[in-house]
C-alpha cells in the first residue's frame, strides 16, 4: 500500500525528532572551547567513538529526511494532478483511514 501524504509527513516528523535528539551533542560542541572539545572527545577513545557514532546518525537521518521530502513533493504533485484531471480525491488512495493506535 502506498504512503499517504499524512503518513509521509509523520515519517518526516519522526526523522526530525531523532535528528534533534542526536544533534544535542553538536549543540554542546558549539559552546565548547577547542581545548574542552579535545579533552572530551579526542583524548579518550570512548569520547571519540561517541562523537563518530553521533555524526553518522545525523548524516543518515539527514539523508532519510531528504528522501522523505522528495516523496512528499511527489505525493503533492500526484494529488494536484488527480484533482486537475477531475478524479475523486477521497477514493482511499490519498487518505489514510482512521484506526486505533492505542
Image (cartoon, rainbow, N blue to C red):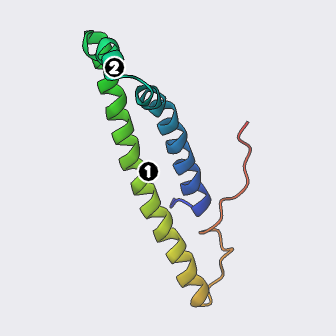
Which class describes the residues within 10 Å of circle 1: few (<14), some (14-19), or many (20+)?
A: some
**Closest to the observer, 40 or 87:** 40
* Place of residue 18 in the rendered image (x, y in percent of width and height, measured from the top left): 50, 36
The residue at the point 44 percent across, 26 percent down is 25
The residue at the point 33 percent across, 19 percent down is 37
Q: Is residue 3 left or right of residue 102?
A: left
Residue 37 numbered tag: 2
Circle 1 is placed at which residue position? Answer: 65
| Above or below for 16 versus 54 | below
Q: CA distance from mark 1 to mark 2?
A: 28 Å
Quadrant containing the C terminus in the rendered view? top right
The residue at the point 39 percent across, 46 percent down is 62
Question: Marks 2 and 1: in contact by CB < 8 Å?
Answer: no
* Place of residue 94 in the rendered image (x, y in percent of width and height, measured from the top left): 61, 68
Q: Secondary structure at mark 2?
A: helix
* Place of residue 55 in the rendered image (x, y in percent of width and height, measured from the top left): 33, 32
The residue at the point 57 percent across, 76 percent down is 79
Asked where in the image residue 35 lies, by quadrant, the reply is: top left
Which class describes the residues within 10 Å of circle 2: few (<14), some (14-19), or many (20+)?
A: some
* Place of residue 15 in the rendered image (x, y in percent of width and height, measured from the top left): 49, 43
| Above or below for 37 versus 2 | above
Amino acid at each position: 500500500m502506498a504512503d499517504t501524504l499524512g503518513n509521509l509527513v509523520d515519517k518526516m516528523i519522526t526523522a526530525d525528532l531523532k535528528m534533534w535528539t542526536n544533534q544535542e551533542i553538536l549543540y554542546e560542541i558549539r559552546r565548547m572551547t577547542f581545548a574542552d572539545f579535545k579533552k572530551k572527545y579526542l583524548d579518550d577513545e570512548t569520547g571519540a567513538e561517541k562523537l563518530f557514532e553521533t555524526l553518522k546518525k545525523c548524516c543518515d537521518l539527514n539523508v532519510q529526511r531528504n528522501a522523505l521530502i522528495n516523496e512528499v513533493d511527489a505525493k503533492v504533485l500526484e494529488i494536484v494532478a488527480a484533482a486537475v484531471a477531475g478524479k475523486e480525491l477521497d477514493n482511499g488512495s490519498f487518505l489514510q483511514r482512521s484506526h486505533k493506535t492505542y
